[in-house]
Image: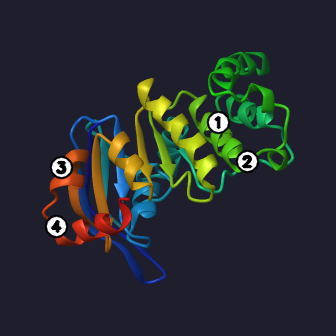
Amino acid sequence: MLLDARDLVQRFDGTTVLDGLSLATGDVQALVLIGPSGGGKTTLLRILAGLDVPAAGGVSFDGVPLPRDEAALRDYRRSVGTVFQAYNLFPHLSALDNLLLPLVHVHGLSPAAARDRVREPLERFQLAAHAHKRPAELSGGQKQRIAILRALVVRPRRLFLDEPTSALDPEMRGEVLAMIRELKETGVEFVLVTHEMAFARRIADEVAFVGDGRVLAAGPAAEIFDHCQSPRVRDFLSRTLI
């Protein structure tokens, strides 16, 4: 994917969250957004995923501008997958039914076709044994993996993941990070917001450091983590990359 975000401005309740942010990437599979809390990473991700419209500026993927009108944005959202740190699973449905619901009611598959589509991914990611369980019966790692799988089974153009491990303990984080590694191995394009610096270094093709509503550094992962010229970024990494 080629991303070109130019002069993005976003404000909430009079507070400027993105302040003329611009970011252009090469043709990458995995883009990782890092930086301090409150710096604008999630706001940027939501704009890229078509969930929010910026007050100013624009975004294009592979040369195609993101729409701004709601009808076209709905179509765009159906073409991508988004995963949040809070899972957003329906508590009264089983894991399987959480997977089937968007396939049937949003993407128009028959129930039989939807079941056929989810069968292999459930097996591949070691979740088939938990398909009958409701979210309350799943561990945090299992819930997040189901949430990622729900976004994946619609066969999205790309995935957007917002700190998918932030609410998990170390063992459960490992489960989710292993799943994301496997997604990369299978060729899925994604944009990931994370505070897992060691993982970001391994998984990213390019990294963007977002702080104070702007991109303060961006480029290949090795360049950002090993040779970044920005004192602000170097200081952040020295405190977080352990």
Q: Locate residue 213: give its quadrant.
A: bottom left
Which tag, 4 or 2, sits closer to the chain's start? 2
**Distance from Cα at disc 4 to Cα at disc 1:** 38 Å
What secondary structure is found at the residue carrying circle 1? Answer: helix
Instruction: Give the residue at mark 1.
Output: 150
Residue 70 numbered tag:
none
> Mark 1–mark 3 contact, CB under 8 Å?
no
Instruction: Give the residue at mark 2.
Output: 89
- The amino acid pointed to by label 4 is Ser
What secondary structure is found at the residue carrying circle 2? Answer: loop
**Distance from Cα at disc 4 to Cα at disc 2:** 40 Å
Q: Is residue 2 left or right of residue 157?
A: left
Crowding at label 2, few (<14), some or many (≥20) Cα neighbours within 10 Å? many
- The amino acid pointed to by label 1 is Arg
**Distance from Cα at disc 4 to Cα at disc 3:** 11 Å
Instruction: Give the residue at mark 4.
Output: 230
Could you say which is closer to the camera, residue 49 or residue 31? 31
Could you say which is closer to the camera, residue 54 or residue 1? 1
For discs 3 and 2, the disc positioned in front in the rendered view = 3
Instruction: Give the residue at mark 3.
Output: 223
Place of residue 228 in the rendered image (x, y in percent of width and height, measured from the top left): 16, 59
Which tag, 4 or 1, sits closer to the chain's start? 1
Q: Is residue 164 left or right of residue 106?
A: left
> Mark 4–mark 1 contact, CB under 8 Å?
no
**Distance from Cα at disc 3 to Cα at disc 2:** 37 Å
